[in-house]
Image (spheres, rainbow, N blue to C red):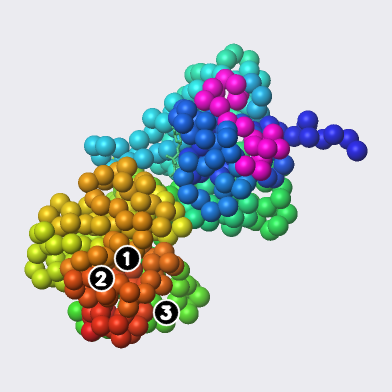
């Protein structure tokens, strides 16, 4: 057989965090030679040794496999990657700016300029990071300024929709592939790269650059809106004596609505939704799109109010003050199946209670380490029971299956006060009540 491997586009992935490391490994799995580039030498060292420096199910196996096959390697040196690659994926972070709601685009600009400067042969730069609409057009100008004379280059946008916790499956089997601003040649290259998911039925949507950027932003804005919608309805349920969980199940049977992202509770967090709706708010205002800005502001306010509501319920449950009281916290990751605590509502609540003078002990199956790095003054326990010892109130803040299933009978023996704040409406209230607990939920009546 002809060795067609040499004709295949070779890939570099700039930024090997949650998105980039997964994308790099998935591209290797799909049969391509991949070089991952990160400016963080510890990340590169770990990944080069086949280790993943964060928790993502299935990813360590894939990285280890393709570091071993030689199809996947990592470096801190961008020139080393551009020298041997044809398609360059930009996967660096776009966090919220320290002083405004706008996205910090300096990493994307630096990474894109670095690729352009170091190109030695024609290349395709593919933006994957989530960016405010209009960014890619500016990056095209940046690329034109930096690319060496005579080297052909094109920049397109291919936003990423993976979910942490399911990142590997989402990358290997995406719901859709969006290609923004691609010439026929670039589209053909992308179709070659994604041949396997396309053959498996993933639709390809080709569009202009701003539409591609906005598809991603509005997907996250819609998901955030769904969560804040149900939390607003939960407020009504609580005031009117209705049950938001039953209501959400009933709503979810309507296929136009769907059951996902309708869980009332502590609200959304993580490295994406909060900063993406804020960046949309900021960008919409710049563009004079005030309805969108207003909607996002309301979504954000409802979401942040959930954290305060859980803090208030905890204070009441602990007898009017948490000062010097022990509070047990189960879960600090922003959602289950990740160790990510970026803008985690759970860590936010735990930290706020600590700042009110509570003695907070936290247990998370995977996120104790990342939480401790962010908030070292909390106490961290290696199991749920140790977190609950002597607690005046117990909080379930992340719905990890092992925390949902924890035994109310065992916990009941070691707490000071059998009151649990079920901030994710994930516990079985009858089971807990049978074990002598008062169960405080959101958007439904307290079960005693
Ligand atoms: P991350 O912080 O985990 O990873 C970003 C990485 O980029 C870091 O390792 C950092 O060291 C590296 N980096 C920054 N500047 C660099 C440079 N100039 N050269 C080389 N490396 C550089 O962030 P993430 O969660 O992977 O998110 C990356 C982007 O993907 C963001 O725009 C995010 O919104 C988007 N996104 C994330 C997810 C997700 O679930 N995490 C999903 C879809 C889209």
Quadrant where the N terminus lies? Answer: top right
Q: Secondary structure at mark 2?
A: helix
Judge depth for marks 3 and 1 and give the one in front: 1
Question: Residue 249, which numbered label?
Answer: 3
Q: Residue at x 88, y 35 (%)?
A: 2
Q: Residue at x 21, y 62 (%)?
A: 327
Looking at the picture, how far across and down is residue 73, in whole percent?
62, 32
Q: Residue at x 57, y 33 (%)?
A: 48
Looking at the picture, how far across and down is residue 113, in whole percent?
48, 23
Q: Residue at x 58, y 43 (%)?
A: 23
Q: Earlier in the sequence, mark 3 or mark 1?
A: 3
Cα gap from disc 3 to disc 2, whole angstroms: 34 Å
Question: Residue 103, which numbered label?
Answer: none
Q: Are marks 2 and 1 in contact (CB under 8 Å)?
A: yes
> How crowded is the residue under tag 2: few (<14 C-alpha within 10 Å), some, or many (20+)?
some
Query: 367 or 192, which lies in front?
Result: 367
Cα gap from disc 2 to disc 1, whole angstroms: 8 Å
Q: Is residue 54 above or below residue 119?
A: below
Q: Earlier in the sequence, mark 3 or mark 2?
A: 3
Question: Residue 414, which numbered label?
Answer: 2
Spot the residue most to the right. Answer: 1
Q: Is residue 379 above or below residue 387?
A: above
Instruction: Write down the region rendered in magenta.
Output: 64-82
Cα gap from disc 3 to disc 1, whole angstroms: 32 Å
Instruction: Name the residue tied to disc 1.
Output: 385
């Amino acid at each position: 057989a002809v060795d067609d491997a040499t004709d295949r586009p070779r890939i570099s992935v700039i930024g090997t965090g949650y998105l980039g490391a997964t994308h790099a490994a998935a591209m290797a799995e799909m049969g391509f030679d991949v070089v991952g580039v990160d400016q963080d030498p510890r990340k590169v060292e770990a990944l080069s040794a086949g280790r993943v420096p964060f928790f993502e199910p299935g990813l360590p196996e894939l990285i280890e496999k393709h570091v071993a096959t030689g199809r996947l390697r990592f470096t801190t040196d961008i020139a080393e990657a551009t020298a041997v690659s044809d398609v360059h994926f930009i996967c660096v972070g776009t966090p919220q700016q320290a002083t405004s709601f706008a996205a910090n685009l300096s990493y994307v600009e630096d990474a894109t300029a670095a690729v352009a400067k170091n190109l030695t042969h024609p290349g395709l730069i593919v933006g994957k990071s989530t960016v405010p609409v209009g960014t890619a057009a500016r990056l095209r100008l940046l690329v034109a300024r930096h690319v060496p004379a005579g080297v052909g280059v094109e920049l397109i946008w291919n936003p990423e929709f993976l979910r942490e916790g399911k990142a590997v499956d989402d990358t290997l089997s995406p719901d859709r592939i969006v290609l923004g601003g691609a010439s026929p040649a670039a589209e053909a290259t992308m179709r070659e790269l994604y041949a396997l998911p396309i053959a498996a039925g993933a639709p390809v949507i080709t569009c202009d650059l701003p539409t591609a950027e906005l598809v991603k932003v509005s997907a996250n804005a819609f998901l955030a809106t769904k969560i804040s919608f149900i939390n607003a309805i939960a407020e009504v349920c609580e005031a009117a004596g209705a049950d938001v969980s039953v209501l959400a199940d009933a709503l979810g049977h309507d296929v136009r609505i769907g059951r996902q992202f309708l869980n009332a509770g502590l609200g959304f967090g993580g490295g994406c939704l909060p900063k993406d709706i804020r960046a949309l708010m900021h960008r919409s205002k710049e563009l004079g799109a005030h309805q969108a800005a207003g909607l996002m502001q309301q979504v954000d306010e409802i979401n942040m109010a959930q954290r305060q509501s859980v803090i208030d319920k905890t204070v009441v449950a602990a007898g009017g003050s948490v000062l010097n009281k022990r509070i047990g916290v189960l879960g600090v990751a922003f959602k289950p199946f990740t160790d990510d605590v970026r803008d985690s509502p759970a860590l936010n609540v735990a930290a706020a209670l600590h700042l009110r003078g509570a003695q907070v002990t936290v247990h998370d199956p995977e996120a104790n380490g990342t939480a401790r790095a962010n908030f070292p003054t909390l106490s961290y326990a290696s199991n749920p029971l140790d977190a609950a010892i002597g607690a005046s109130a117990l909080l379930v803040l992340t719905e990890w299956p092992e925390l949902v299933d924890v035994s109310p009978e065992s916990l009941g023996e070691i707490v000071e006060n059998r009151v649990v704040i079920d901030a994710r409406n994930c516990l079985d209230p009858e089971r807990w009540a049978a074990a002598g607990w008062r169960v405080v939920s959101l958007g439904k009546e307290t079960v005693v």
